[in-house]
Amino acid sequence: MTPGPWDVLLAEYGDHLSLSRRLSPNTVRAYLTDLRHLANAVDVPPRAVTLQVLRGWLAALLEGGSAPSTIQRRVSAVRGFFAWAVEQSLLDEDPALRLRSPRKTRRLPVVPAQDDVADAMASTRARAEEGPLAVRDLAILEVLYAGGIRVAELCSLNLVDVDDERGVLRVVGKGDKERAVPLGAPARTALAAWRAVRPPLVRTGSANALFVGARGGRIDPRVVRRVVHDATSAGGSDVGPHGLRHAMATHLLEGGADLRSVQEILGHASVATTQIYTHVSAERLRAAFRQAHPRA
């Protein structure tokens, strides 16, 4: 079957996202999925899409009960696509230029308390005698909490990314942006213990991987999520890897770290993204005030 006009443009746009913007395959797939949703909904070729057509599509999403976050994501994908198409002279006008999406309500992240994180570490440390995988699990927890890195970033770490002399990790984040993440003494100790018992588990294809699974391949994100959920449940606060990232940022700010430093460690492109953790800290202060102050 001959590709339609949407297929041709989306294929070119996918190449642009992958090769020029160097986005991850999952991110590219998400953008193209949202754009295909538009293509199927409007049932007109790209050149026939107008602002009115897009507003009708947006209204249908709202009436269908789509979450504001989903609508905002789809509108963002559409804006990026049409702006690119006009820039490449593939379309004459950008119909999405004045398209507005509903505001997304920003919910504060669930953040485990410092004691809950400490309990999760302690329960995992107590299992260290069970074998190498238990030692690995503690190293995973310590690195996630110390560095505040994403689960995908952890899974892609290689042995050479650990700088023992400076006590930092070399992390490649979104958009292939590289940053150095400091590690505290507990994380460095846990990593050293894991690397000491790691060699017998490694297979040929994963010789460079810092973390490996039970079968010797590079560790899978699902395994990391299971490790974190099991540990934090035992610690009294069931969260995943992103919960430890939230915890690290919040606890840093509560300890007096400045916002820009936390932004740099987390790898946020904008400090506005990091500012949500100041709200979390402020809410905790208010809760403590209401609980303890005689005139609260």
Image (tube, helix red, strand yellow):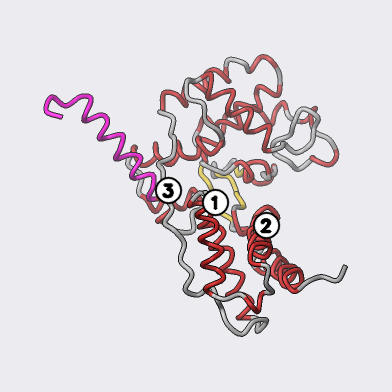
Q: Counting other residues with Cα less than 10 Å from the Cα at mark 2, is it few (<14), some (14-19), or many (20 or more)?
A: some
- What amino acid is at disc 1? Gly
Residue numbers of the magenta segment: 275-296
Q: Secondary structure at mark 1?
A: loop
- Asked if 158 appears above or below 8 in the picture, the reply is above
Q: Position of residue 142 (x, y in %)?
A: 55, 31
Q: Is residue 176 left or right of residue 237?
A: right
Q: Badge 2 is on which residue?
A: 33
Q: Badge 3 is on which residue?
A: 262
The tag on residue 64 is 1
Reply yes or no: does residue 166 show up in magenta: no
- What amino acid is at disc 3? Val
In the picture, which quadrant includes the N terminus?
Answer: bottom right
Give the camera-side residue of 189 and 247: 247
Q: Nearer the viewer, mark 2 or mark 3?
A: 2
Q: Is residue 279 left or right of residue 222?
A: left
Residue at point 34%, 45% (across, down): 278
